Amino acid sequence: MSSPTPGAHCTARVLANGPLELRGSAILLNGEPVGAEAWLCRCGASASKPWCDGSHKTAACVLTGEPPLREGRDLPESGAPLNLEPQPNGAVKATGPLVILNDAGAVTDRVTQAFLCRCGQSARQPYCDGSHKRAGFVAP
């Protein structure tokens, strides 16, 4: 995938059996700049949550690279940042314009807010479905 275009919306590519690949010009974590690219853990095994540390390779998790196709919303003009807020023992709340891509790079959704699974248990990957509660997922 190429570098983000200045002013373009942030994207989240759902990598099969791997993390969420975030790209964009304004990615924030709790309001602090992260950079133009980041990888969010989806398997729940990373020691550096919410970031991927490669643990999915040995965690034997099977994660789809085909998120559900949704009727995308019109996004506001670009330029707004994507702010990531990990919820205690739960999902990562993503606020701001975000384009969700499948593993092949095709658009599957457009959102201005989403709760992204980081426990690896959601049946609605990459979205949270509350499975972290049943699984006893623990993360700051």
Image (spheres, rainbow, N blue to C red):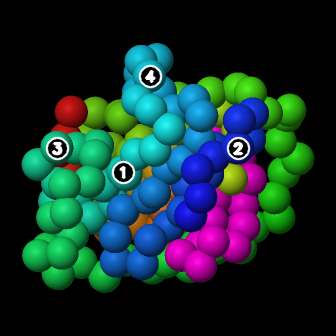
Q: Is mark 3 in CB contact (under 8 Å) with mark 1?
A: no
Indicate the position of residue 95 as horizontal and vertical percent values.
60, 33
Q: Name the residue under label 2.
A: 5
Q: Earlier in the sequence, mark 2 or mark 1?
A: 2
Q: Earlier in the sequence, mark 4 or mark 3?
A: 4
Indicate the position of residue 23 as horizontal and vertical percent values.
54, 48
Frontmost residue, 1 versus 89 = 1
Q: Earlier in the sequence, mark 2 or mark 4?
A: 2
Q: Is residue 26 above or below residue 114?
A: above
**Numbered disc in front, either 2 or 1:** 2
Q: Name the residue under label 1.
A: 40
Q: Which amino acid does label 1 sit on?
A: Leu
Q: How crowded is mark 2: few (under 14 residues within 10 Å), some or many (20 or more)?
A: few
Name the quarter where the C terminus is drawn.
Answer: top left
Frontmost residue, 119 versus 102 = 102
Judge left or right: residue 67 versus residue 51: right
Indicate the position of residue 41 as horizontal and vertical percent values.
30, 55
How many marks on residues? 4
**Numbered disc in front, either 4 or 3:** 4
Q: How crowded is mark 3: few (under 14 residues within 10 Å), some or many (20 or more)?
A: few
Q: Name the residue under label 4.
A: 33
